[in-house]
């Protein structure tokens, strides 16, 4: 047994009894972990995790990773100038006009 046996592999992915695809759930786990998924998606992912051991392990690994990053970066704060620059880029709108010849 090697150290990677505890995690879901591509071969262990499938579909649950509700037709939810494991690969789709794995791709959307960060949305679920960060509470960014909509109510219907959250319920579908939660139901899938209740039935699928390999996806549940991936979910638990993502929770652990998020916790470790939060703990490691807790004391670090971005400089205020950088924060303002990022916020201004997020809220700015860019319009590009092209002409066809």
Image (spheres, rainbow, N blue to C red):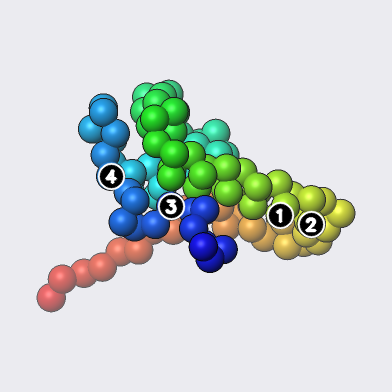
Please, is residue 47 above or below residue 75 in the view?
A: above
User: In the image, residue 4 lies at what x, y percent?
Assistant: 51, 62
Circle nearer the N terminus (2, 3): 3
Decide which of 17, 39 is in the foreground and name it.
Answer: 17
- The residue tagged 1 is 69
Q: Residue furthest bottom?
A: 101
Mark 3 and mark 1 in contact (Cβ < 8 Å)? no
**Residue at mark 3:** 8
Q: Residue at position x 31%, y 56% from top?
A: 11
- Mark 4 residue element: loop
Q: Mark 3 Cα within 10 Å, few/some/many (few <14, many 20+)?
A: some
- Residue drawn at x 64%, y 52% is 65
SS at mark 3 in the image: loop
Distance of label 2 from label 1 (alpha carbons): 5 Å
Separation of marks 4 and 3 at Cα, in angstroms? 11 Å
Mark 4 or 3 closer to N-term?
3
Query: Callout 4: 10 Å neighbours few (<14), some, many (20+)?
Result: some
Which numbered disc, 2 or 4, marks the residue that appears first in the sequence?
A: 4
Q: Cβ–Cβ below 8 Å for labels 4 and 3?
A: no
* For residue 5, above or below residue 34: below
Separation of marks 1 and 3 at Cα, in angstroms: 22 Å
The label nearer to you, 1 versus 4, is 4
Residue under label 4, please give it.
14
Mark positioned earlier in the residue sequence (1 or 3): 3
- In this view, the residue in front, 19 or 81, is 19
């Amino acid at each position: 047994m090697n150290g990677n046996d505890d995690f879901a592999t591509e071969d262990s992915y499938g579909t649950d009894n509700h037709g939810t695809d494991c690969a789709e759930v794995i791709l959307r786990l960060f949305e679920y972990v960060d509470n960014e998924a909509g109510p219907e998606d959250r319920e579908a992912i939660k139901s899938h995790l209740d039935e699928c051991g390999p996806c549940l392990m991936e979910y638990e690994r993502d929770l652990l990773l998020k916790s470790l990053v939060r703990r490691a970066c807790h004391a670090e704060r971005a400089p205020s100038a950088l924060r303002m620059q990022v916020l201004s880029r997020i809220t700015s709108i860019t319009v590009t006009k092209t002409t066809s010849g």
